[in-house]
């Protein structure tokens, strides 16, 4: 177990320089067990790639980095395979590796920052696909009893950026390994999301579209709109797209017929929070060293040396403006400490 300098700057994609008491890099399940055994009576925090957290203050306890690795493919049939990956596998690398193995299913989720273990917790999603669409099972260790348990799909209660691990079982388990059911030989491509449709319409492809081609398109579309956290600190979408009633959806559409509103399977609607923020002319808006990204208003960025408090204050300002104007309360997607 490595214990390093307790500054969290390199362990959160916002690049916020909060301090922790200590940082432990756990590179095996045995190290995970030791860490849990020695932390029964005090708080601690697990971080994967730190791509969905904002530290607004120093964290006065120990931080554990999920760094155990390993991946394998189990063929199930001519057309299906299980990809089994350890929690510490970096997500995008895993996506590209699966595509190189001829497996399909993760292409729409290319370039999402984060790790395998964190992916089910908030059911990561992009371009019409969510992790739940390929999820088979995950293994997790109970934080106090150290009992290892397998969670089947139905037990995870996946929702929009949501799962049982954020609700009833919050902070009770550490996900150690995840299995994803992927396609081989015969792939079903999902390019229903408008920017992807436009991309392939423009490319005028005559041959069948491969999963790898979808991943390449997703990467290009993301790069055009979303800042690379290696270059400019950010945590992707800061807020969730709010779920609204049909009455609210009608009201918004009567004010502006171009409001991006998406019907949900349960009869409710989602409205694009980025669009609402953009309508308030907040793209590029700065408060101290924190700013609203100039190409995607749902993304907050650290323009260099911003504190977590500055980013948080900017997020509060945005929430207030959206609430005053639209009577919609934005909810953070990012976990705030
Ligand atoms: N829009 C604007 N101005 C903006 C931002 C968005 O007008 O500044 C409009 C767009 O033109 C579009 C609509 O709002 O009509 C939706 O925008 P976009 O397609 O960029 O997606 P999003 O709803 O803002 C969600 C996810 C992203 C994911 C994309 C693509 C959430 C909270 N965010 O963003 O996920 O990549 O769809 O599927 O659901 C993340 O979770 O960190 C993340 C980046």
Image (cartoon, helix red, strand yellow):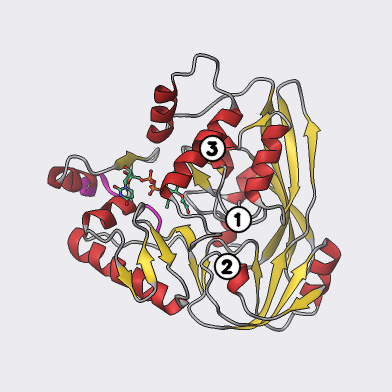
Seen in the picture, residue 204 relative to 64 is either above or below; the reply is above
Seen in the picture, residue 176 relative to 319 is either above or below; the reply is above
Q: Where does the magenta region start and end?
A: 239-248
Q: Earlier in the sequence, mark 3 or mark 2?
A: 2
Q: Name the quarter where the N terminus is drawn.
A: bottom right
In the displayed structure, does residue 173 sit left or right of residue 220?
right
Give the Cα distance between marks 3 and 1: 15 Å
Give the Cα distance between marks 3 and 2: 24 Å
Residue 97 among magenta residues: no
> Residue at label 1?
114
Q: Earlier in the sequence, mark 3 or mark 1?
A: 3
**Residue at image x 56%, y 80%?**
18
On the image, which quarter does residue 38 sit in? bottom right
> Residue at label 2?
12
- Asked whether mark 3 lies closer than 8 Å to ligand 1, one says yes
- Asked whether mark 2 lies closer than 8 Å to ligand 1, one says no
């Amino acid at each position: 177990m490595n214990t390093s300098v307790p500054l969290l700057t390199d362990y959160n994609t916002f690049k916020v320089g909060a301090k922790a008491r200590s940082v432990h890099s756990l590179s095996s399940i045995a190290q995970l067990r030791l860490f849990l055994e020695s932390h029964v009576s005090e708080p601690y925090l697990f971080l994967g790639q730190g791509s969905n957290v904002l530290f607004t203050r120093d964290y006065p306890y120990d931080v554990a980095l999920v760094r155990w690795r390993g991946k394998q493919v189990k063929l199930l049939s001519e057309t299906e395979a299980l990809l089994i990956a350890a929690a510490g596998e970096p997500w995008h690398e895993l996506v590209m590796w699966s595509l190189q193995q001829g497996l399909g299913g993760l292409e729409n989720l290319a370039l999402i920052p984060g790790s395998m273990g964190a992916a089910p917790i908030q059911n990561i999603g992009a371009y019409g696909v969510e992790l739940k669409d390929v999820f088979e099972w995950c293994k997790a260790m109970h934080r106090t009893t150290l009992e290892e348990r397998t969670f089947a799909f139905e037990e995870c209660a996946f929702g929009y950026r949501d799962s049982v691990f954020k609700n009833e079982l919050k902070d009770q388990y550490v996900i150690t390994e995840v299995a994803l059911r992927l396609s081989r030989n015969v792939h079903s491509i999902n390019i229903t999301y408008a920017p992807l449709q436009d991309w392939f319409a423009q490319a005028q492809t005559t041959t069948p579209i491969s999963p790898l081609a979808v991943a390449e398109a997703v990467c290009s579309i993301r790069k055009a709109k979303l800042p690379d956290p290696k270059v400019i600190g950010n945590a992707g979408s800061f807020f969730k797209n709010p779920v609204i009633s049909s009455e609210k959806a009608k009201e918004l559409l009567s004010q502006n017929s171009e409001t991006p509103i998406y019907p949900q399977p349960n009869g409710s609607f989602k409205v694009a929070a980025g669009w609402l923020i953009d309508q308030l002319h907040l793209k590029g808006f700065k408060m101290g060293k924190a700013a609203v990204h100039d190409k995607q208003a749902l993304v907050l960025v650290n323009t260099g040396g911003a504190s977590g408090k500055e980013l948080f204050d900017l997020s509060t300002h945005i929430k207030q403006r959206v609430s005053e104007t639209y009577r919609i309360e934005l909810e953070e997607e990012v976990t705030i400490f």
